[in-house]
Image: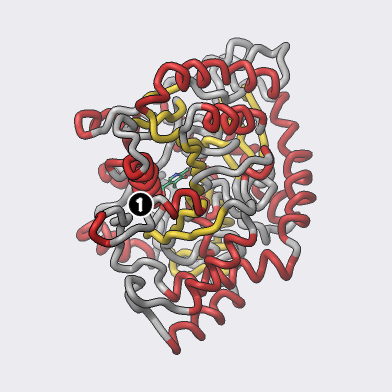
Amino acid sequence: MSDFHFKNGNKIIKRDLKVLWHPCTQMKDHEKIPLIPIKSGKGVFIKDFDDNNYIDAISSWWVNLFGHSNQYINKKIKQQIDSLEHVLLAGFTHMPAIELSERLIKKSPKEIKKCFFTDNGSSSIDAAMKMSFHFWKNQGYKKKSKFIALSNSYHGETLGSLSVSNIDLYKKTYEKLMKQTIIVDSPDCYNKNTSHSDEKHTSLMFDKMLSSIEKNHKNVCAVIIEPLVQCAGYMRMYHPVYLKLLREACDKYKIHLITDEIAVGFGRTGTMFAYQQSNITPDIICLSKGITGGYMTLSTILTTDEIYNAFYDEYTKLNAFLHSHSYTANPIACAAANASLDIFENSNIIQKNKSTSRYIYNKIKKFWNHPNIGDVRQHGMISAIEMVKDKSKKIPYDWKERRGIRCYEYGLKNGVLLRPLGNVIYFMPPYIINRKQIDKVIEVISGAINIATK
Ligand SMILES: *Cc1c(COP(=O)(O)O)cnc(C)c1O
């Protein structure tokens, strides 16, 4: 991005590159693509050291819900720091964790009764895997040790969570370190037979899941799944009917259903939690990302008394669930999470998002007419536009051409942070984005598509 000049930022970039190794980055890319040092954030904007503003159209990796430096969340965090910054959660407790657990359980189906805190998304998946395995072990099912996951799934990048993921980019190199997972074809609707509805396609795809469950159930602890949208998996989407069918099969064959709501939870798909659109109760629900409104790391597992009670025993039986993190349920993080729930409740966010998401779809549907756009899709506040080399056959561009990076660069030059996943441009803004800002993002996406498909 040679025509991107920072004045004040340059010194900071140099200091950074001397000492920092960034996530999800080939560091050599920064010889050409500048790192963007950010000085501050306010609302949907982040501001660099040269006072350029960028609309954060991806909620800073899907975490931010109510804007950067939100006044109300700031206030609640400051109050919390002044009374208790942290205390261990083993043998001790505190009000922010109790209050948050009560509120999350109240928002869940009646069978969900317990909240187990972990540290980040990946660690909640690892803990959920251990919890499911250990439940079956405590119940005397000695053979159950495997997991079923979908193709193109993403559940995190620690060894456990990467094991149940299925995106080569993140996994292939580390395959030898992985636990074996049973992978079933994803029901995503991108490549469906166009004469089928999404519901029909998704239901038909369930046959593959069902036969895998029938074949493997004796050895399987749980099916772990991202409800409705495979976010890191290029924002591919499927119909809620899948989770309904999956719930029935899991019940019939004694398998847990673990829903990974880390990205889709807290309103992203239009309901507070995505699984609610299928009217089911998962056995284990993993939450993170938006849980603190995008302020800091925190995650939790919600589960049933049936699972909890399988660990409740005399100490000497050694049936307790042994999983702990030093900062489990940090009070400041819990205070941010409680503040974020206050905003949901006091400002009618889920209802307001309905009209925001309709407004966004009405704007992006025009991209269907573009000769190099193969799909325009949306689930609530997640919208995605897929660039293709050949529209009629849906032939993708070669990944080596890195067309997404062109969109990223064009976006930055024009004041919008877009960060395409491969050839997929997505829009997942903080909920406080206004119409004018949406219009600006759409305009920049339009320009980015034209540059990237040239
Ligand atoms: C981000 C993500 C994770 C991992 O969470 P981290 O906090 O990054 O470890 C797991 N599952 C899904 C669906 C995610 O989007």
Indicate the position of residue 10 as horizontal and vertical percent values: 34, 61
Image quadrant holding the C terminus, namely top right
Q: Amino acid at mark 1?
A: Ser
Determine the secondary structure under disc 1.
helix
* Label 1 CB less than 8 angstroms from ligand 1: yes
Indicate the position of residue 147 as horizontal and vertical percent values: 38, 32
Q: Residues within 10 Å of mark 1 (few under 14, many from 20)?
A: many
* Extreme-bottom residue of the structure: 82
Compared with 343, 251 (above or below) is above
| Front position in the image: 171 or 281 | 281
| Label 1 sits on residue | 123
Q: How is the image coloured?
A: secondary structure
Q: How many marks?
A: 1
Compared with 430, 80 (above or below) is below
| Front position in the image: 95 or 384 | 95
Indicate the position of residue 218 as horizontal and vertical percent values: 38, 25
Relative side of 5 to 55, left or right: left
Q: Residue at x 44, y 84 (%)?
A: 81
The part of the image, by quadrant, that contains residue 113 is bottom right
Asked if residue 444 can be seen in this view, the reply is no
| Front position in the image: 247 or 434 | 247
Indicate the position of residue 261 as horizontal and vertical percent values: 53, 47
Q: Residue at x 34, y 78 (%)?
A: 87
Compared with 42, 382 (above or below) is above
Image quadrant holding the N terminus, namely top left
Q: Residue at x 62, y 54 (%)?
A: 108
Q: Residue at x 52, y 71 (%)?
A: 336
| Front position in the image: 180 or 443 | 180
Asked if residue 271 can be seen in this view, the reply is yes
